[in-house]
Amino acid sequence: MPGKDKFTAVERSAIMARVRSWDTTPERLVRSTLHKLGYRYRLHDARLPGKPDLSFPSRRVALFVHGCFWHRHPSCKRASTPVARQEYWLKKFERTTARDLRNRVELEQNGWTVLIIWECQLRGARWVPEVQRALKAASRLTWTRKFGVQVNRSP
């Protein structure tokens, strides 16, 4: 029967209870990779809008590791909508994406660079150079803000 969940309410509740909001496998992979590269960061800083998964306060960079399903990665096959209770899911996804946008705008208005790594991007390592470039650029910007001059620093 279309639109009907194949699990009972109790089974579905148990499944959903196991869904984590932080310390997820994709987040741990990003943290581990960046730590091995020598980057140090804060986890889930409650002082920042949206409590970014990783934040680099000295560089004013906030990094979110988004699951494609929950945060609705555009054009990603993982961003499917469940058949059962579609009205509920569509409202939930709308609230999530609106909150993500609100947090991003607030961070950017406060001078933070916001990076988003999608779960599906973690299959390869292409995300690593992009994050490194952003962190390096933010580091130069912070240096300029702090000392008022652009200094030629080795790339």
Image: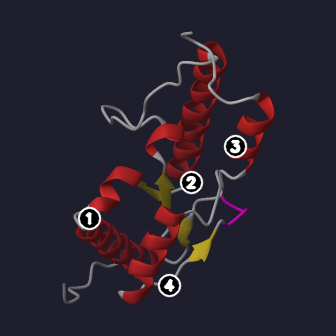
**Relative to residue 95, is residue 142 depicted above or below?**
below
For the residues labelled 4 and 2, the Cα–Cα distance comes to 21 Å
Name the secondary structure under disc 3.
Answer: helix
Q: Is residue 110 magenta?
A: no
Which numbered tag is attached to residue 147?
A: none
Are circles 1 and 3 on residues that touch, CB within 8 Å?
no
Location of mark 1 (residue): 130
**Magenta segment:** 45-49
Q: Is residue 124 above or below residue 86?
A: below
Question: Mark 2 or mark 3, which has the lower sequence index?
Answer: 3
92 relative position to 128: left or right:
right
Residue plotted at (44% across, 72% down): 29
Crowding around mark 4 (Cα neighbors within 10 Å: few <14, some 14 to 19, many 20+) is: some
Q: CA distance from mark 2 to mark 3?
A: 34 Å
Identity, as a three-letter code, of the amino acid under mark 2: Asn
**Picture coordinates of residue 81, whole percent (x, y):** 49, 24
Distance between the Cα atoms at labels 2 and 1?
22 Å
Please state which of residues 153 and 69 is positioned toward the viewer in this rendering.
Answer: 69
